[in-house]
Image: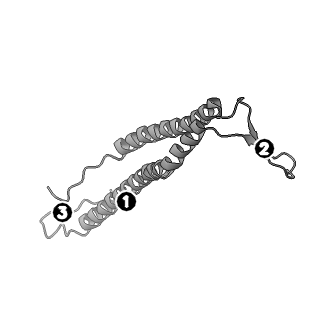
Amino acid sequence: MAGDWDIQPQGVQGQLKIVGGHAGDLSTALNNLVTDMQAAAQAAGTAVPGSHAKVEIQGPVPVGAPPLSHGAMGPVAAALSQYLEGRQAELKSMSERIEACLTGTVKAVNEYIAGDLTAAKNAQNAAKSVDLKALGIQPEDKSK
């Protein structure tokens, strides 16, 4: 029937834990992807003879900061970098959608529970206001 709801908050909570676990797994996989691609880019080397080619940059460096010089980027590293750069918006969007789904579900279930409590309170108040004598029912004497 339209308008009828049968949400089991405990069941929803269990599903949220499962989805949250998968979201954590996805986050770990994406972090590993970036780390592995960086390692692959460094291992691929450059088009310059010798794998230790460096781009030398001169200038002052604050204490504790990494040096300005860094390894030269070869064609494979450049391609991997472009790949990740091109996917960055998609990966961020995926993460944001998962977070929005989880947050929206929690909010909806909380509203459902609040609505159930309000409906129960209204039903109790309606039951208290029924004139039992008019229905031919003698109210119980609660003083006994």
Q: Quadrant of the N terminus?
A: bottom left
Q: Residue furthest left?
A: 136
Pointer 2 local density, CA inside 10 Å: few below 14, some 14–19, many at least 20: few
Q: Which residue is mark 2?
A: 69
Q: Residue at x 44, y 40 (%)?
A: 17
* Cα gap from disc 1 to disc 2, whole angstroms: 56 Å
Name the amino acid, label 3: Gln
Q: Position of residue 143 (x, y in %)?
A: 34, 60
Q: In the depicted view, which residue is nearer to us: 31 or 66?
A: 66
Vertical placement of residue 2 versus 131, above or below: above
Disc 3, SS: loop
Quarter where residue 141 is shown: bottom left
Name the amino acid, label 2: Ser
Q: Which residue is mark 1?
A: 111
Name the amino acid, label 1: Glu
Q: Residue at x 64, y 29 (%)?
A: 43
Q: How is the image coloured?
A: one colour
Disc 1, SS: helix
Q: Which residue is mark 3?
A: 138
Q: Residue at x 31, y 58 (%)?
A: 116
Q: Residue at x 38, y 52 (%)?
A: 105
